[in-house]
Amino acid sequence: MNKEISISNNKAILNFSKAFFNNTDDLLRSDGFYEVLKSFVNFHKENNTRIYSYLEKFFRSSNIDSLAGEIRDITKILTVMSLDEISEKINKYHDLDKERDALLRIVEDMYDYWRKLERYSVIEKVAGKEGLEVENFLGSNIKLKDMILEIYRKVEISITGKVQKVFRQVPAGANSSIIVRKSNIDYPDYCRWLNDIPYITKVMIETPYITYTKSNKRDGFFKEVEENPIANIDINTDEYLCYPAKIADNLIYVYFHQDYITHGISASNLFELADEDEVVNTKPDGLYIFGVKDDRDLDIFYEDKENDLFIGYCNFADKKDYFGYLKKMCLTLNNIISMKKGYLPIHGAGVNVVLQNGKTANIVILGDSGAGKSESIEAFRSLAKEYIRDMTVIFDDMGSFRIKNGEVAAYGTEIGAFVRLDDLDSGYAFKQIDRSIFMNPDKVNARLIMPVADHKQIMEGYKVDFFLYANNYDRLNPDDKSISLFDNKKEAIETFKAGARMAKGTTTEEGLVKSYFANPFGPFQKQEMCDDLIENYFDKLFDSNIKVGTIRTQLAIDNMESEGPKKSARELFEIIKSL
C-alpha cells in the first residue's frame, strides 16, 4: 500500500505508516480525508441523490474534486465557527444559514457513509524495531475513533446551535487494525516476489464485527492442475496482504487481494496466526493466492514436487467474495499435505465430553457440509446442564486421525468455527457477539466465525472412542434409534466412503448428493492415497474395538432441524453412561 487510504469494494484501508493523525487538524488536512469525501460525492453523483443536488446548489459545481474540496473547507471552518458566524463573516458562505437543515442532512449522510464502509487500518513494522508502530497499535484506533466523533459533534453543534442530549459511542474508527511486515523467505525464483507482500503479525478486531460479502455460498471443489498457476503471473504486490495461517502443524500462507481483506481478517478467528519469528524466514508447506484479477474462472491447486510446495490459486470475482473460498482451499492444501505424512483427514466434528457421572468419551462425527456435525456439537452444548460436566471442541469442521501411542487419536486443524447462524441455539450467537465475526446476518446461510479452542488444545491428540457417520436424511419414527453401530468393517467403510447427505443450502448443491469420504477437500482429489489410509485406520479402529457407526441427525427433515440433533445427542450420552 503506497497511499494513505484505498477505497474500493465498500472497504476503506488506512495506511497509518504513510500518515498518522495526531489531532483533528491533521485528519481534516489529510489526503485520506479528501479521498473519503471524493468517494462520498462520487457515490451520490452516480446515484443522482438529493444530497448531490444540495451540493451542486451550495457550491455551484458538478466537479467531484471541486465539491470534495468545498466540503473539506466548510468542515474545517465548522469545527471552529458556528454556522451563523460563517454566514455573517465569510462572503463565500453568505446566507448558508438559510440552508441549515439541508447542510445538517449532508453532514449526517457523510458520517453514515463513512460508518457504512468496512474500515481497516494498517501499520507497517520495520524489521527488528519495536517502535511506536507497535506501542500504538491498539491506541491508534481509539484515537482515530475519538477524533472522528469529535469532528462530527463539533460540526453538528456549529450547525444546530444545540448540544446533543444522547451520546452514542458507536464504532467510528477502524473495524479492524493490523500490523504487517515484510519477509525474507527462500522462495523458488518464480514466486520470490511474494516477499514484497507484507504479512500480518498482529490483528485487532473491534466487535461487534459485522460484514457483508457479495456471495454467501461456495460452489464446487478445487481441482488439481499440472501447470504452475503462478509461474508467470503479473500482479501488483501493493494490492495484496498475507495471512500466515498455522493449520494443525502445517504452515499455509494466504496472499489475498486487499478487496478481500474481510476474509483475511476473518481468518484470525478460525486459523492460528503463525508466530512472527516462525514466519519471517520460513518457507511454508503451502501458499494460496486468493483474489487474482484474472479473466479465467479458476479454483485450482498445484504441487511443486521439486520445491515440496503446494500452491492454491483463486481468481477475483463477486461470486468468490465468500469466506468459504479462503477456508476450504486452505483445508484442501492442509489435508493433502497431511495425507502425505500418513494422517487421515476427517471432515466432521470432534469433541471430548465429560458427563455428569464422571465418564468421559472422545466423539468424532464425520459428514460433509450440512450433514449435522456442527449441529450435533450445538446439541451437545444445549444439553450440557442435563448431561455434560465439561466439553472440549477438538475440531468443528476439519481434523485428522493419527496414531498416538499405538491408538487412533483425533487432532484438530482450526481454532475456531465457521457455523450457520440458523443452526445455533437461540440466543447463543448473541452471547458470543463480543468475540465473533458475523457475515451476512440477515441473509440465507448467514454465518458466524468464532474462536472455540487454542492451538495447543486442538493438537493434544485425543484417543477416539466413537467414530460416527452423520446421516441427515433418514426420517426416524419416535421409537427408532438414532445411533447404530457396525459389526462389519467393509460395510462401515462403504458407508463412510459413500459420503451421502441431503444438501442443506450451504453450497450450490441440491437434493441427495454423495462425496468421497464426505470430504471434497483433499481426499476427493487424492482418492488412491486416501483409500490406503482409510483401510489402515479402519483396521486399527476395529482391532481396537472402537465404536464405529451411524448417527441419524435428521437435520434435513422438515421441523427436525433442532430436535433431530438433540435426540441423537441424548441417545449417544445414554450409551456413554451405560459403558
Image (cartoon, rainbow, N blue to C red):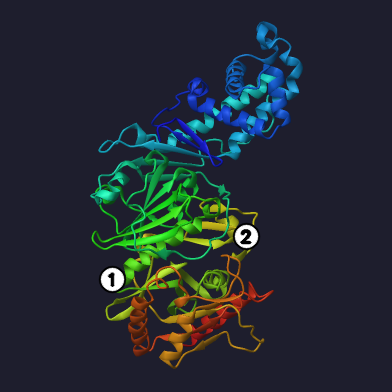
* Residue 281, horizontal then vertical, whole percent: 24, 48
Circle 2: element type = loop
Q: Spatial distance from mark 1 to mark 2, Cα to Cα? A: 41 Å
Viewer-nearest residue: 241 or 508: 508
Quarter of the picture holding the N terminus: top left
User: Which disc number belongs to residue 427?
Assistant: 2
Of circles 1 and 2, the one toward us is 1
Q: Tell me which label, 1 or 2, sits earlier in the chain.
A: 1
Residue 367 vs 292, above or below: the answer is: below
Amino acid at circle 2: Gly
Disc 1 designates what residue? 341
Amino acid at circle 1: Lys
Residue at 29 percent across and 56 percent down: it is: 284
Circle 1: element type = loop
Viewer-nearest residue: 410 or 120: 120
**Can residue 545 be seen here?**
yes
* Residue 442, horizontal then vertical, whole percent: 65, 54
Corner quadrant of residue 65: top right
Q: Is residue 71 left or right of residue 256?
A: right
Viewer-nearest residue: 55 or 418: 55
Residue at 36 percent across and 55 percent down: it is: 229
Corner quadrant of residue 461: bottom left
Residue 173 vs 499, above or below: the answer is: above
Q: Is residue 253 left or right of residue 501?
A: left
Corner quadrant of residue 75: top right
| Residue sticking out furthest to the bottom | 487
Viewer-nearest residue: 157 or 189: 189
Residue at 36 percent across and 64 percent down: it is: 334
* Residue 539, horizontal then vertical, whole percent: 34, 87
Residue 89 vs 548, above or below: the answer is: above
